[in-house]
Amino acid sequence: MAGGLGCLASATASRGQSNPPLLTFAYGRQFSSAERKALEAWSSVLTRLADGWWRTITTRLASPGFVTVDQITIEFNDIKIKGAPALTHESVIEVDARGLLARLRDPDALAMIAHEMVHVVQRYPHAAGWLVEGIADYMRYYVLIPDDPGRAFRPDGATWHDGYQASAGFLDWVEQGHPGTITRVNATLRAGEDGQALLRETLGQTLQQAWGAYIAGKPYATSAEAWRRRATASRG
Ligand SMILES: [Zn+2]
């Protein structure tokens, strides 16, 4: 199993008794009773993890005047877009039920929701896709579940604007050198500005130059060991 699970467990935290639950679950199509039972069991594990994730997401991605929602609907459905395991629109995270039922014990299926929960709060009027997905994966792989081997990526041919793991690793490197950058980039994106300009300004160089420096430092996410752990985890 993935090393990420221990971290998933430690991320658990409870919300106040008087709060309504953060997550509610909806069933967008018919399920057999066995499927329904399996999805309910999976949902209860997710529920225990999500409160802690949410607190961290809403704190790290806070910005002046922005009010986060306090309820998210997880809807089990058949997603028509091929290959999409989940989609987020506003406060609804649609999860592809067929795909999930095939990997209920895969910790990656739970961690995927951490990524989608970041999309719930992004609310950027317009933003480069790589930043949207890069920030979601940065939060997932470097903040919420930092031991998750799924963050590994192949450096050859990768770019800072790939989105997902490559961009997440790059953004983590920027944050390490300039703490608070991701919070500031998120705030400018929400305000409708271009977060890339802020990144260039913070780094004092082009993003291409910075990416070169990041990769030259041989980040762990590109190491053979990270790849070995990723391959082991995916068999779990
Ligand atoms: Zn995404």
Image (cartoon, rainbow, N blue to C red):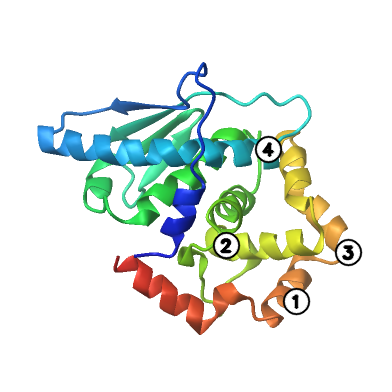
Q: Earlier in the sequence, mark 3 or mark 4?
A: 4
Three-letter amino acid code at the position of disc 2: Asp
**Mark identifier at residue 204:** 3
Relative to 155, say whether 89 is above or below.
Answer: above
Marks 3/2: CA–CA distance: 21 Å
Residue 33 x, y percent position in the rendering:
11, 32
Q: Residues within 10 Å of mark 1 (few under 14, many from 20)?
A: few
Is mark 3 in CB contact (under 8 Å) with mark 2? no
Q: Earlier in the sequence, mark 1 or mark 4?
A: 4
Element type where label 4 sits in the image: helix
Question: To which residue does mark 1 refer?
Answer: 213
Marks 3/1: CA–CA distance: 13 Å
Three-letter amino acid code at the position of disc 1: Ala
Q: Which residue shows up at 26% across the image and 38% down it?
A: 41
Question: To which residue does mark 2 refer?
Answer: 162
Relative to 123, say whether 225 is above or below.
Answer: below
